[in-house]
Image (cartoon, helix red, strand yellow):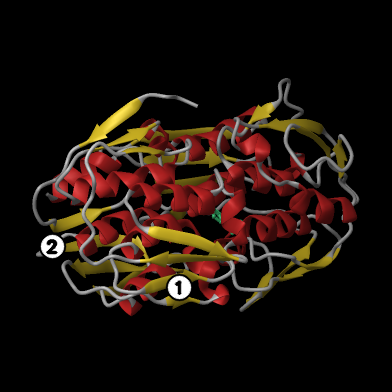
Amino acid sequence: MSEEVTIIEPLAGPLCGTATVPGDKSISHRAVLFSAMAEGTSQLQGVLDSQDVRSSMGAVEALGAQVDLVEQPDGSLAGSVTGWGAAGPRQPEEPIDCGNSGTTARLLMGVLAPWPITVELTGDESLTKRPMRRITAPLMKMGVTFKPDGREHLPLQETGTDHLRALTYTMPMASAQLKTAILLAGVYANGTTSITEPAPSRNHTELMLPEYGVTTMAATGSASVKGPAVMKASDVVVPGDPSSAAFLASAAVLCPHSDITIENVSLNPARIGFVRTLERMGADIVEHRLTSEGKEPCGTIQVRGGARLRGCEVPSQHIASLVDEIPVLSLVAAHAQGITVFKDVSELKVKETDRVAAIIEGLSLLGVDAWEEGDDLCIEGQPQLEVPEGLVFDSHGDHRLAMTWALVGLTGSIPVAIKDFACVAVSYPHFLEAMKALA
Ligand code: S3P
């Protein structure tokens, strides 16, 4: 991890005007991976150009898909992906490096499950510490082999099978990555593969698989696919990423007199829990549904700053709908009157870093009390919060923490320093430019 420190200067003023955000990261990964699995050539537009998505692109290329995605004037990637279809992926010569991307690693495990090749998956320092048995355990029930046997972390060698057994599985945690890995394997298994989850996680896979010709059933907290099926090429237009929009929205909430509109963003209810939470905190935020990209509802999010904020409780059933936004919502909660409680955030401890510990550490630099109570994260806000001088935040190499602590400097009146700010390239390479353009 880099020790380089970046100084973030205040924007000095309200945020105003319209903005767009880069393509949704989850949908971009799926568009690349599903197109690689499919027979024929898919046309993709609005794909996020970030390190994480490039990890998925590199992985499917190593497996024999042809990826012709080129940079567009707006910074997105567009073009075609020709998949391996019924012929299957080729045996790669080298291990596949998934970089920092948990989505690449975990979804690939499902992608590789139906093919009798042996692939070693690995990743960076953070990814090789993240739990993988949650994925390997159900895939092993379907007939896949992982070596070393029973190991929790990458690197792992996966050998798939063309005799996959369909699975009915009760997931121990609400995780879209786990759900997707099982469903993707299920596409090639004989029979119906079904999952149930303890709370609804993001549903992009269920919305997209039918577009690729897979018979898919979905309801709140459950999903199934009917196999075996050969996926067929599809065209995907990726809408803006609500998780990136959350940083612009939170910045506007924290800057009095701000008035911004974020356009062309996915308004999928499984992703905009942060809008509901900011609303409950008293923020002036509203979304307008205008259209849809495929089955994804899309539209604008309008935010006005300066409202009096109050703490609130976010129940465990809603955590998955804002799981990536808890760092930045914690910063908003630090400015609210009263206590905010995020219930049952144990999944946050196994993200790119232990985000619960990192949030508590960063808020304590601000002089804000934050603590764990069992699996809950509690924050006691200070409406008159004064940011001390000379703060140095550690991103711990985690893009969402880097952007969260950058907001302290951008929306305040005192510069702050951030260790390893460059990691924002994982999801939002032009984050700082986007913020400055609104100032
Ligand atoms: C993702 C699912 C979420 C999220 C991650 C992306 C996905 O993780 O945190 O950034 O694209 O499926 P879970 O697997 O915990 O839902």
Q: Can you identify the residue that label 2 sits on?
A: 258
Residue reaching furthest to the top: 93
Is residue 116 visible to us here? yes
In this rendering, the answer to whether 245 lies above or below 284 is: above
Disc 1 marks a residue whose amino acid type is: Pro
SS at circle 1: loop
Residue at (41%, 71%) from the top-left corner?
340
Residue at (18%, 50%) from the top-left corner?
412
Query: Looking at the picture, how far across and down is residue 375, in whole percent?
Result: 61, 65
SS at circle 2: loop
Q: Quadrant of residue 409?
A: top left
Mark whose residue sits in front, 1 or 2 = 2
Query: Looking at the picture, how far across and down is residue 65, in whole percent?
Result: 62, 34
Query: Looking at the picture, how far across and down is residue 97, in whole percent?
Result: 63, 29
Residue 89 is tagged as none
In this rendering, the answer to whether 35 lies above or below 258 is: above
Asked whether, in this view, residue 438 is left or right of residue 371, the answer is left
Task: Give the CA separation, mark 1 to mark 2.
Answer: 25 Å
Asked whether, in this view, residue 146 is left or right of residue 403, the answer is right
- Asked if the residue at tag 2 contacts the one at tag 1, i.e. Cβ–Cβ closer than 8 Å, the answer is no
Disc 2 marks a residue whose amino acid type is: Ser
Q: Can you identify the residue that label 1 sits on?
A: 269
